[in-house]
Amino acid sequence: MKRNADELLTFILDSISKIASLHNPDKLLVALSDMSKDIVFADRCSIWILDKRKKKLWTRVADGIKPIEMDEKVGIVGYAVKENKSLVINDVQQDERFNSEIDKITRYETKTMMVIPMENNHGEVMGAIQVINKKENEIFDNQDLKYLTLAASYAAESISTILLMEEINQTQKEIIYRMGVTGENRSKETGFHVKRVAEYSWLLGKLYGLPLGECNILRDVSPMHDIGKIGIADAILNKPGRLTDEEMDVMKTHVQIGYDILESSELPLLQAASIVAHEHHEKYDGSGYPRGTVGEDIHIYGRITALADVFDALGSERVYKKAWDDTRIFKLFEEEKGKHFDPKLIELFMENKEKFFAIRNEFTDV
Ligand code: C2E
Ligand code: SIN
Ligand code: SIN
Ligand code: FE
Ligand code: FE
């Protein structure tokens, strides 16, 4: 199986234009792996990523299939990565480095294999491209090795960019989550409160019809809604009884404090978080705080987090109140529909109660 020079050029240009138009990392990895597979007529291709901290090699396969993970030193791939060496092996089952465990998991018989290490922008090995079983029982030759090396160097650039972006995203999310937990811990709210509010918010966004990307943003930032509570004195925040009007006025400043902390950041996630911190106590009829914004002038992130937060607050014990039972919560929701809460969100909530219960059951406080 060979291509002539013309076919090869067409194939490469095709692949590159297809890949360049993809912005979703998972789809991009699949496209890179398809390209690598097709360029050498292989049956399968895996892209292995080296996780230096965990000392693991793992492969992120197409949607739905669990990533495969193995020790960084294991197998032919482990060898290629450790030695930074490209390998062509046409009698895999005879090779003592071969890790036959993977075949057992995937129920597949590996016969021939090529592995090309990939380097990141700093010249460090960050993983490998592996193709398995040349079609029609042929063997991989030097020409195949050349082509796959080409594909690997192209893939390496895209992948190192993806990994860098994911690291930045992950860092942002982790900072946000930890800040959210910090805010809640101050007010002695239990560990899973922020987690539940995050999941309720995601679900409300989905039911409301927000694009998945926005739902995910909302899930990441809604835990931050009460970050401003770090600026409220303990005597008020953890007062066992009801707050006086003066104390409540102080308490209400937590939305402005939170907004001020986050708003000046240019990180997109922190920008979104600042909206949630600012607007989660606005009410649909304009009677909320801090600005008394009305209806859909309240950002949808604010309207959603408001419902998620109150649902969770009412169902939980606080220093100042016992947990409410569900009947009482739903009665309040019906009464507050169009007053405190966006009527559309209340309807979606009521129609999908079991889904919210499922989240609550998954993240119960112990
Ligand atoms: P939180 O405990 O996280 O409550 C969030 C929101 O859930 C409240 O916003 C309110 O809209 C709703 N909520 C919670 N518990 C009840 C309740 O027993 N009845 C009703 N109708 N709604 C409830 P809100 O009122 O703006 O309060 C903001 C934050 O102020 C609360 O966050 C809590 O940290 C504090 N807070 C409010 N009232 C009291 C109080 O009487 N005593 C103390 N120690 N803290 C209070
Ligand atoms: C190996 O690297 O030895 C096994 C990996 C595989 O078969 O996918
Ligand atoms: C409360 O009763 O603790 C708060 C009242 C409210 O804002 O819904
Ligand atoms: Fe709040
Ligand atoms: Fe809260």
Image (cartoon, helix red, strand yellow):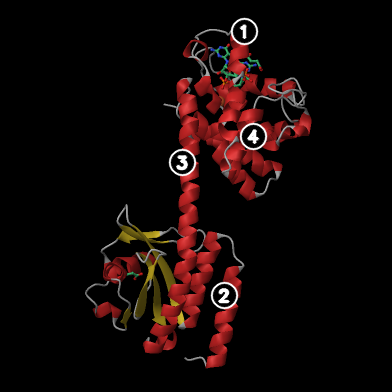
Mark 2 or mark 1, earlier in chain: 2
Quadrant location of the C terminus? top left
Badge 1 crowding class, 10 Å Cα cut-off, few under 14, some 14 to 19, many 20 or more, is few
Residue under numbered circle 4:
275
Mark 3 or mark 4, earlier in chain: 3
Q: Is residue 12 above or below residue 246?
A: below
Q: Is residue 308 visible?
A: no
Where does the image place residue 281, in percent across and percent down from the top left?
66, 24
Mark 4 residue CB less than 8 A from any atom of ligand 4: no
The residue sitting at 47% across, 64% down in the picture is 159
Residue under numbered circle 1:
246
Q: Which element is circle 2 on?
A: helix
Q: CA distance from mark 3 to mark 4?
A: 18 Å
Mark 2 or mark 4, earlier in chain: 2
Q: Which element is circle 4 on?
A: helix
In this view, which residue lies farthest toward the bottom?
Answer: 4
Q: Are marks 3 and 4 in contact (CB under 8 Å)?
A: no
Residue under numbered circle 2:
16
Where does the image place residue 357, in percent across and percent down from the top left?
57, 33
Q: Are marks 2 and 4 in contact (CB under 8 Å)?
A: no
Where does the image place residue 156, in percent across and percent down from the top left?
44, 68
Q: Which element is circle 1 on?
A: helix
Amino acid type at image mark 1 = Glu
Residue under numbered circle 3:
174
Amino acid type at image mark 2 = Ile
The residue sitting at 39% across, 83% down in the picture is 145
